[in-house]
């Protein structure tokens, strides 16, 4: 909801405060700038101090800054508060990684699609809310009401458990066992017999038994192994180096490009829905544009928001059957097909239909990449890895308003669409180049165990 409202607030504030097109774009861009900082920061915090702390902070910052932005007295205050909202929203990857660590491998794709469905519900609810609130109460009420869901998150903090996989990796096995016992009670079953053993312990045991010279690792060898295996205690710089290690560097760099392309395309399509159907694409004189800047087609935004439901259904149907790579790449290339006719001006109905189709495809790729990304990283750097990739995506989010708003306002619709085509096509190529498929693959806890599973796959 906080992201979707940007396509409504920008034109309204531009009209109310006589802002330039650049200043209108900045309202959106600063949110992504904040998300860039937040995604990296919350990822490191949750990998070092737990998923629940990241959850608490992101909810508090988003709710507080979102509500206060409704009372912003001028443009500068609005920019600062929306940037803080972005920092809070940057915790999204923490939530997806946290949820993922509770899901068994065979059902992971389906349940992550269910998880992503709430994003779609938020976009539709925001479009409905804007359609009702904006003409009657104005943009300030929209900002205030849109902050309520983030506030409600705080009510659930006390009942949310820490990830048992994270607790086990940290050596807190009794705490992890307590969480699993609670899960078993809620499901009216019992835990299977046995003890909790982490991937790290298995690796150390195997190295001990495979050694021909000694049955026990010497302190010196143990010490040298620590940076490689116990990397969960690393700082932000060390975690980033792990992401760029030989085992992960190819996946990391390709993932960054895909996240950039996904964010650039998704938010660009949301903004294009308002820009191409509100008179801006007619290349009117500047003074007329200012007068009609609030003439947002709420109907078209509402219709294209429903395109996310077919995108989710396609994701659910293909992610565990065809695999992550094939599903993503096919949707990227199909999105190019839908956008191609928009290189030329089309009737309003056809424009909406084409944007509807493109939104289906980009929603599917966005959903699947958030399933794939946590699966390729070990638990020790999972939220950091997804957080950094998400941060790179936010750079795409910062740039896309300048394209979707700036180029269209400047009568360069063709150049804007061609740029979207190039970014989306290159993203599809990067998906094809991913080194391995993660369908049905167990999550790993350390870099070396991840490498072993990849080799097996």
Image (cartoon, rainbow, N blue to C red):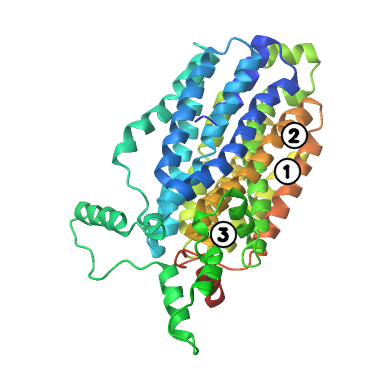
| 257 to 79, vertically: above or below | below
Secondary structure beneath label 1:
helix
| 227 to 384, vertically: above or below | below
Q: Closer to the camera: disc 3 or disc 2?
A: 2
Residue underneath mark 3: 327
Residue underneath mark 1: 420
Q: How many numbered marks have been drawn onto this rendered protein structure?
A: 3
Confirm or deny contact between disc 3 and disc 2 (CB under 8 A). no
- Which label belongs to residue 66? none
Confirm or deny contact between disc 1 and disc 2 (CB under 8 A). yes
Report whether residue 349 is seen. Answer: no
Q: Earlier in the sequence, mark 1 or mark 2?
A: 2
Q: Mark 3 and mark 1: span between their CA atoms?
A: 20 Å
Q: Quadrant of residue 376?
A: bottom right
- Residue in the picture at 79% in, 15% down: 286
Q: Nearer the viewer, residue 292 or 400?
A: 400
- Residue in the picture at 22% in, 70% down: 193
| 137 to 428, vertically: above or below | above
Q: Position of residue 250 (x, y in %)?
A: 67, 63
Q: In screen coordinates, is 408 left or right of 445?
A: right
Report whether residue 192 is seen. Answer: yes
Circle 1: is it few (<14), some (14-19), or many (20+) Cα within 10 Å? Answer: many
Q: In screen coordinates, is 427 left or right of 304?
A: right
- Residue in the picture at 60% in, 27% down: 83
């Amino acid at each position: 909801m906080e992201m979707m409202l940007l396509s409504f607030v920008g034109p309204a504030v531009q009209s109310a405060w006589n802002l330039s097109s650049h200043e209108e774009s900045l309202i959106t861009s600063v949110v992504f700038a904040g998300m860039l900082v937040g995604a990296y920061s919350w990822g490191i915090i949750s990998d070092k101090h737990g998923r629940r702390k990241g959850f608490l902070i992101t909810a508090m910052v988003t709710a507080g800054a979102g509500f206060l932005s409704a009372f912003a007295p001028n443009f500068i205050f609005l920019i600062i508060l929306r940037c803080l909202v972005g920092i809070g929203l940057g915790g999204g990857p923490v939530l997806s990684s946290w949820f993922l660590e509770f899901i068994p491998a065979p059902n992971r794709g389906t349940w992550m699609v269910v998880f992503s469905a709430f994003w779609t519900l938020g976009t539709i609810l925001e479009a409905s809310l804007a359609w009702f609130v904006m003409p009657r109460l104005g943009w300030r009420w929209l900002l205030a009401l849109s902050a309520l869901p983030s506030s409600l998150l705080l009510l659930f903090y006390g009942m949310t458990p820490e990830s048992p996989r994270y607790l086990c990796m940290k050596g807190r096995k009794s705490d992890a066992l307590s969480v699993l016992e609670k899960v078993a009670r809620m499901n009216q079953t019992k835990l299977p017999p046995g003890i909790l053993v982490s991937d790290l312990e298995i690796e150390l045991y195997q190295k001990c038994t495979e050694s021909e010279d000694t049955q026990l690792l010497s302190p010196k060898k143990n010490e040298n192994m620590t940076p490689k295996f116990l990397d969960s205690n690393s700082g932000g710089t060390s975690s980033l180096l792990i992401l760029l290690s030989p085992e992960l560097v190819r996946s990391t760099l390709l993932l960054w490009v895909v996240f950039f392309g996904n964010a650039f395309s998704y938010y660009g399509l949301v903004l294009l829905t308002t820009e191409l159907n509100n008179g801006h694409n007619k290349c009117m004189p500047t003074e007329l544009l200012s007068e009609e800047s609030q003439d947002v087609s709420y109907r078209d935004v509402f219709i294209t928001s429903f395109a996310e439901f077919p995108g989710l259904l396609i994701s659910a149907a293909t992610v565990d059957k065809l695999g992550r790579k094939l599903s993503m790449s096919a949707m990227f290339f199909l999105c190019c097909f839908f956008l191609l006719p928009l290189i030329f001006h089309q009737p309003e109905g056809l424009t909406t239909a084409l944007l509807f189709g493109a939104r289906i495809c980009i929603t599917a790729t966005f959903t699947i990449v958030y399933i794939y990304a946590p699966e390729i990283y070990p638990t020790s750097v999972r939220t950091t890895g997804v957080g950094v990739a998400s941060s790179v995506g936010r750079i795409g989010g910062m740039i896309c308003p300048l394209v979707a708003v700036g180029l269209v306002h400047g009568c360069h619709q063709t150049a804007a669409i061609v740029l979207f085509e190039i970014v989306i096509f290159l993203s599809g190529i990067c998906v094809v180049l991913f080194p391995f498929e993660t369908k049905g693959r167990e999550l790993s806890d350390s870099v070396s165990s991840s490498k072993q599973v990849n080799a097996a796959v």
